[in-house]
Image: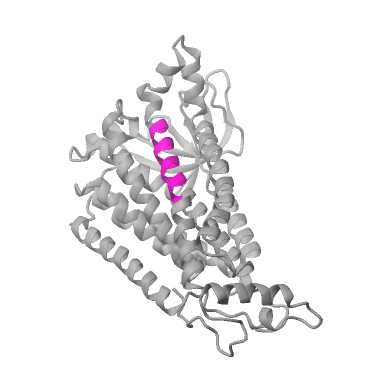
Amino acid sequence: MGAGHSHSESPPRASAATTRVLWALVVGVLAAVIVGAAATWPSSWDKLGSESFLYEGATRLEAEVISFDETTGESTVQVTTPGAEEERTMAPAGVASLTFEPGDEVTVIEVDPAQPLIFSDFSRDPPIVALLIVYVVLVLAVAWWRGLGALVGLALAFGIVAFYTVPALFDGASPPVVGLVTSAGALFVLLYVAHGPNARTTTAYLGTIAGLLFTAVIGTWAVTAAKIPGVPSEAEINLAFLDGRLSLQGLALCGLMIAGLGVLNDVTITQASAVWELGKARPDLGPWQLFTRGMTIGRDHIASTVYTIAFAYVGASLPLIMLIAVYDNPVSTAITSSEIAGEVVRTLVGSIGLVLAVPLTTAIGALIVGIGGEAEADEAGEAGVAGHDHAGDDAARAAAAERAGLGSPEHDTDPREPGGAV
């Protein structure tokens, strides 16, 4: 490595013995995922797209609003059909607060050519596509190749949900098993594509899997004990109507595990990186010292994510909270009501899994760094730059060598075995 290269930019490598242990653990998790996927693999994908969204004989059309009558609520729109453009009347939308302006792009439904068109929704493609482009450009500009890996991993993870999770649930598979397989499989793709196959990534992966297992166990009890969902949402009622085999409580549990994956992954990868950087900066620290210092950082992660999850729920459910607040009802009764209890349980179970994942990830990282050691040697850092005082580095290496029982750091060979990237 050339002078001035940052040690933290290179992927961490564990010792050969640690590498074998990590590979064995990862292979064990993947084997369980494969077995679970094979047991719940959907027999067919015929259910996807099998139900018509429109009435029989109805047609969806794209239109542009030309004028809007505030008194009657009717609009004049220009409809583009194959080979022709014509002006048609669009019936009132049915929502008093919904108004239109000339130039609005809308989607309309034609049931009968002789009747006014029915408003379906606004055409939101342009602003959403613009936001997507800005998001992708910013991610690539700031995070470079790592950002590209995160985007590719995200696309692959969504592919798992679309082509495995949803068909498997429609096929009557066990929702808890599907949730665990989806979470573990999507997490594997996300982490290793975005962060690379190295020991730090594996530390985060194993810590997240441990947190997911606790989430699954606690969530199974909570969903059953609290009878979630008590009164299903409109979407859940529609799903139950379309396929009576679906378990609404099972769907709640499966969704609970997948919903907590993003925040859980964010905390564990950051925590693993923190422990690894501590080990690089202080090679004299043992596993317990790394764990205690890593948990100092971890407590800040826990504190921040507690209110992050809480406010994410409050923001998403603000209309419901306002509606409940209107009625003369005790706060305790409102929180445990069927309308809001499901989200409260999801938030609490996800937070419990997240809090447990922090010490678990920190402990795994501390054991790997403190006992196995890091095999990668930063030659630039060891050689130092011209005029750099090596007293601190020599003292740290001496303490590390003495702790390992290898005497003084004046050995010509590195006491740690070189290992592969896990």
Q: Pick whichever, 67 or 101, lies toward us.
A: 101
Question: Which corner quadrant holds the N terminus?
Answer: bottom right
Work out which residue is located at the far top of the displayed protein and give it: 328
Q: Position of residue 313 (x, y in %)?
A: 49, 34
Q: Pick whichever, 90 or 226, lies toward us.
A: 226
- From the viewer's perspective, tell me whether residue 242 is left or right of residue 219: left
Task: Report the residue at 48% width, 83% height from top.
Answer: 418
Q: Relative to 272, does residue 330 appear above or below in the rendering?
A: above
Q: Pick whichever, 313 or 128, lies toward us.
A: 313
Q: Which residues are magenta?
A: 343-357
Dominant secondary structure (helix, strand or loop) of the stretch shown in magenta: helix
Q: Is residue 152 magenta?
A: no
Q: Which corner quadrant of the image does residue 5 belong to?
A: bottom right
Question: Which corner quadrant holds the C terminus?
Answer: bottom left
Q: Position of residue 208 (x, y in %)?
A: 42, 55
Q: Relative to 169, does residue 269 appear above or below in the rendering?
A: below
Task: Report the residue at 52% width, 83% height from top.
Answer: 415
- From the viewer's perspective, tell me whether residue 16 is left or right of residue 179: right
Q: Relative to 403, does residue 207 appear above or below in the rendering?
A: above
